[in-house]
């Protein structure tokens, strides 16, 4: 497509349940790099193919840091304070090195007993209360929240105070600019106070380790530290709880796959990868990347200074990569999904997120093997006006 043509309005449609807009499939075939205009910011190139997405996310000629010099194409009223997600190397390397010591597979594996214990503790509460029970507020939210608060050193009892502030990170239409700005400032102020406390009285938690490493080695600014801790809290709290509840919805809407997983628990690792691929957790696009030189993607020239928007839900349904891409198949073997991103910004917390989802699903299957949705699945309500796709509630009986 010529960049002289008028950009197409994006997003094409509102996200519905776990549906992926069928227009993506058409674009992958016929117009894989499309000029679009988002509700906010400048026009950009929408990238829909898996291979082009890997280039946009992994090639150093595409920059995240350059977004700060532009009115970034986006769905949110204000550009998001993304800390490590808004950096290129070497600044990005400095922050990632600090976190890499914590989010190793080995270190995460040491957390398994605590995480599994927390899943069972919360299910104890559901059983004691009796059916029906809401898996969102009764399991997904407190489970993800407890794990990330424990890891960071954020008092879990403060979550009623800060939980509302987290929405500012991904709100598209449900909050005004002023509300987003105010809640972001409140969250950053709260984290800054925690860091002052940990500097005076260090504890065995990630915020204490970040403050210590910054003071002694990597010399992060206070702003970098606060934004980094905020991003970790948001990712660990909101996205993990949403992925878990959406995964349960996917299983409930595919009962034959749910029964297969119960019969063959050895499929769990493969099932988690399929859930990460199939669930379009980010409804539309992830953060823009800016070309630092002329680059061609699928026959379209991206000029230096222009941005691309990676549509990960489209990449994860790319027929050239995934056989029967629209099929939810827990036995899928070849699954190079981009659910955790790609390149230097690939999610550092991926091993932890995998463990949390596995622990919660295994505990549910063990304790409530006959659980089922208490209402018709098509009557469930979804959060509106957010970039992260999530059910509001998931009531179950057993």
Image (tube, rainbow, N blue to C red):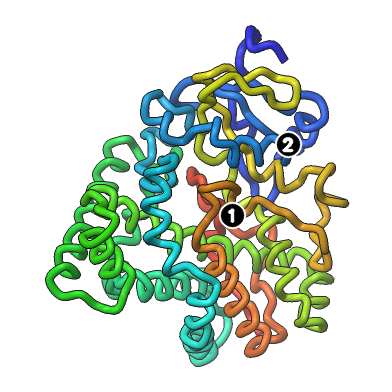
Answer above or below: position of 320 versus 395.
above
In the image: residue 215, left or right of residue 8? left
Residue 240 is situated, as x and y percent measured from the top left of the image, at: 51, 64
Residue drawn at (36%, 46%), measured in percent from left and top? 83
Note whether residue 129 is visible. no
Task: Give the residue furthest to the left.
Answer: 200
**Which of the marked residues, 2 or 1, is nearer the chain's N terminus?**
2
Q: Nearer the viewer, residue 57 or 386?
A: 57
Q: Residues within 10 Å of mark 1 (few under 14, many from 20)?
A: some
Residue drawn at (59%, 37%), measured in percent from left and top? 59
Residue under label 1, please give it: 340
Q: Residues within 10 Å of mark 2 (few under 14, many from 20)?
A: many
Residue drawn at (26%, 52%), measured in percent from left and top? 220
Residue 100 is situated, as x and y percent measured from the top left of the image, at: 45, 63
In the image: residue 295, left or right of residue 93? right
Disc 2, SS = loop
Task: Give the residue furthest to the right.
Answer: 324
Q: Nearer the viewer, residue 292 or 44?
A: 292
Q: Quadrant of residue 192?
A: bottom left
Residue under label 2, please give it: 49
Disc 1, SS = loop
Note whether residue 122 is visible. yes
Whole-Å distance between the Cαs marked 2 and 1?
16 Å
Q: Nearer the viewer, residue 250 or 340?
A: 340
Q: Are marks 2 and 1 in contact (CB under 8 Å)?
A: no
């Amino acid at each position: 497509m010529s960049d002289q043509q008028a950009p197409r309005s994006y997003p094409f449609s509102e996200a519905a349940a776990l549906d992926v807009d069928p227009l993506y499939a058409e674009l992958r075939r016929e117009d894989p790099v499309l000029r679009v205009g988002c509700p906010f910011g400048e026009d950009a190139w929408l990238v829909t193919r898996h291979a082009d997405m890997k280039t946009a996310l992994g090639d150093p000629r595409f920059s995240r840091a350059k977004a700060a010099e532009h009115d970034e194409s986006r769905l949110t009223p204000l550009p998001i304070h993304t800390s490590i997600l808004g950096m290129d190397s070497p600044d990005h390397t400095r922050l990632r090195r600090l976190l890499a010591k914590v989010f190793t597979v080995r270190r995460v594996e040491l957390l398994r007993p605590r995480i599994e214990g927390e899943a069972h503790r919360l299910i104890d509460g559901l059983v004691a209360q009796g059916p029906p029970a809401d898996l969102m507020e009764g399991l997904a939210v407190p489970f993800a929240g407890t794990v990330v608060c424990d890891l960071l050193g954020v008092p879990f009892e403060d979550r009623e105070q800060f939980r509302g502030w987290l929405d500012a990170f991904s709100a598209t239409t449900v909050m005004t600019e002023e509300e987003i700005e105010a809640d972001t400032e409140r969250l950053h102020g709260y984290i800054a106070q925690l860091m002052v406390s940990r500097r005076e009285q260090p504890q065995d938690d990630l915020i204490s380790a970040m403050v210590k490493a910054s003071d002694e080695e990597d010399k992060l600014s206070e702003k970098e530290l606060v934004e980094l801790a905020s991003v970790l809290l948001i990712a660990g709290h909101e996205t993990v709880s949403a992925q878990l509840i959406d995964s349960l919805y996917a299983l409930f809407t595919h009962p034959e796959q749910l029964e297969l997983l119960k019969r063959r628990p050895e499929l769990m690792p493969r099932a988690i990868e399929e859930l990460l691929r199939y669930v379009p957790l980010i409804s539309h696009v992830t953060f823009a990347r800016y070309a630092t030189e002329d680059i061609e993607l699928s026959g379209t020239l991206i000029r230096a200074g222009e941005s691309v928007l990676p549509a990960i839900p489209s990449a994860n349904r790319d027929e050239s990569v995934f056989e029967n891409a629209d099929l939810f198949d827990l036995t899928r073997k070849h699954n190079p999904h981009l659910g955790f991103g790609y390149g230097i910004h690939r999610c550092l917390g991926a091993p932890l997120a995998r463990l949390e989802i596995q622990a919660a699903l295994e505990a549910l299957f063990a304790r409530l093997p006959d659980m089922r949705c208490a209402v018709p699945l098509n009557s469930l309500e979804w959060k509106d006006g957010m970039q992260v796709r999530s059910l509001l509630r998931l009531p179950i009986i057993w």
